Image (cartoon, grey):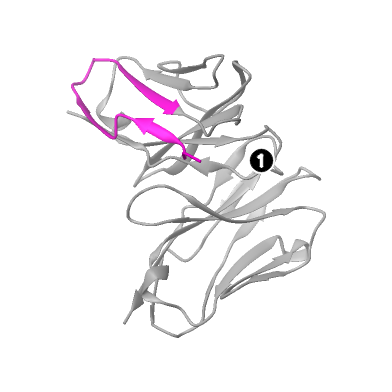
Amino acid sequence: KAGVTQTPRYLIKTRGQQVTLSCSPISGHRSVSWYQQTPGQGLQFLFEYFSETQRNKGNFPGRFSGRQFSNSRSEMNVSTLELGDSALYLCASSTALEGNTEAFFGQGTRLTVV
Amino acid sequence: AQKVTQAQTEISVVEKEDVTLDCVYETRDTTYYLFWYKQPPSGELVFLIRRNSFDEQNEISGRYSWNFQKSTSSFNFTITASQVVDSAVYFCALKGFKTIFGAGTRLFVKA
């Protein structure tokens, strides 16, 4: 079956702009999590959605937001982009929220803010 | 607070050598899960193993093996007879309420 699909794969934006990233989970998966990966901070948890509700949130400013649709697809939005938002954004899907489930990751969206 | 420490930033080995990647974690949760992921150059994280806090049984899967010791809060990963295709960044992760990743260990396997 198809894996986790993230679009776009690459993005270049200017400081101050906003951006929306998309994640289509594996069919049947209801949980979607988002992570930011940077060379300096490593992999950091952004938020987790299950059944259209945000269940968990990492320590990121309010400029970072997300949502999940009824078909489990998820989007994350970053407003007023800063240079430090340049990162690889990874999305993972799993069947449930509980840790005892395997998470499948997409290839990520590489965002560059100039 | 939760924390995952992967003290080895980079490891370089020659093909067929055995290599162990260390992972030490901190958590106050009594129920938690530990994971290892591999990140090849293509970017996506590939799941390798999951352990819950009540299962200290070690596991072997082909050339991969994992040693979970609750007494030392460690969940180490050993690759036996390493191959060039094992070259990647390996992440240890802890999930209690939230998922915390270690900084990763970059493994270079030279032919």
Work out whether A73 lies above or below B44. Answer: above
Q: Is residue B109 left or right of residue B62?
A: left
Work out whether A101 lies above or below A74. Answer: below
- Residue at horizontal 46 percent and vertical 49 percent from the top: B45
Residue type, mark 1 in image: Ala
The answer to which image quadrant residue A95 occupies is top right
Secondary structure of residue under mark 1: loop
- Residue at horizontal 41 percent and vertical 47 percent from the top: B44
Instruction: Say if the magenta span includes residue A7.
Output: yes
Labels in figure, total: 1
Badge 1 density bin: few <14, some 14–19, many ≥20, Cα 10 Å: few
Residue A103 percent coordinates (x, y): 58, 42
Q: Is residue A108 left or right of residue B24?
A: left
Figure quadrant of the C terminus of chain A: top left
Closer to us: B76 or B9: B76
Closer to us: A14 or A107: A107
Residue A23 percent coordinates (x, y): 43, 28
Residue A75 percent coordinates (x, y): 43, 20
The span picked out in magenta is A1-23
- To which residue does mark 1 refer? B1
- Residue at horizontal 49 percent and vertical 83 percent from the top: B81
Closer to us: B63 or A1: A1
Q: Chain of mark 1?
A: B
- Residue at horizontal 28 percent and vertical 33 percent from the top: A86
Work out whether B14 lies above or below A108. Answer: below
Work out whether B37 lies above or below A113. Answer: below
Instruction: Say if the magenta span includes residue A113.
Output: no
Residue A73 percent coordinates (x, y): 49, 22
The answer to which image quadrant residue A109 occupies is top left
